[in-house]
Amino acid sequence: MLSQSFLGLCLAASATWAAAIPVPDPTPVGPALAKRTDHYGTATVYDQNNYPGSCGITNPDSAVIVALGNKWMDNEYQSPFCGRTISVVNTGSSDGGVHGKGNTITALVQDTCESCQNDNLDFSIGAWNALTSNSEESVVDVTWHFNS
């Protein structure tokens, strides 16, 4: 009889103890991840000329970097977009003079393209060559999105 009472007391204590354990809140901590947004525009190429871009860094022409338009950079020196990367897909050119359709690159944001409208981009020579299979300087259609 004593052992049944002792067992009952142990079970009751266990149930009370288990009920007192906090249950984690299912709400995620931190900001939610944003859905990837594709942007559609055209891309051109520019020379670095050993000058720092609007992000404050001098890059060689061979670097795979990109200048975003003021829609993104907002005429800011060292914009919050500096140092982010974008993935870019060459979707072809209307005149067929630019090669590399389907090529994809990841480029580092390092400058502002003041003449770029909306989602258009301006690439370093290194980025342009990778994206267009070393095509002559021209204009190419692109789809791109932010990675980081």
Image (spheres, rainbow, N blue to C red):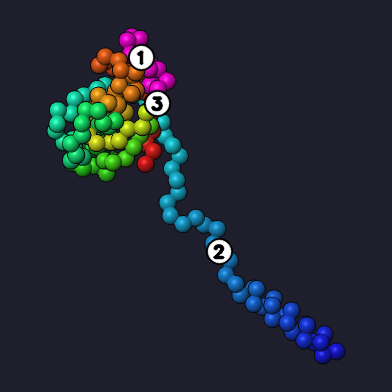
- For disc 2, the marked residue is 24
In the rendered structure, which segment of residues is drawn in magenta? 89-103
- Report which residue position mark 3 lands on: 104
Q: Position of residue 45 (x, y in %)?
A: 24, 22
Q: Earlier in the sequence, mark 2 or mark 3?
A: 2
Label 1 sits on residue: 99
> In the picture, which quadrant includes the C terminus?
top left
Residue 29: percent from left, percent from top: 46, 57
Crowd band around label 2 with a 10 angstrom C-alpha radius: few (<14), some (14–19), many (20+): few
Q: Secondary structure at mark 2?
A: loop
CA–CA distance between discs 2 and 3?
42 Å
Could you say which is closer to the camera, residue 123 or residue 143? 123
Q: Work out whether residue 39 can be spotted.
A: no
Sequence order check, earlier mark of 2 and 1: 2
Considering depth in this image, is 89 or 36 the residue closer to the camera? 89
Q: Nearer the viewer, residue 80 or 135?
A: 135
- Tag 1's secondary structure? loop
Q: Which amino acid type is marked by label 1?
A: His
Q: Residue at x 34, y 18 (%)?
A: 133
The answer to whether any part of residue 10 appears in the image is: yes
Q: Position of residue 96 (x, y in %)?
A: 35, 9
Q: Quadrant of residue 143?
A: top left
The image quadrant that residue 105 belongs to is top left
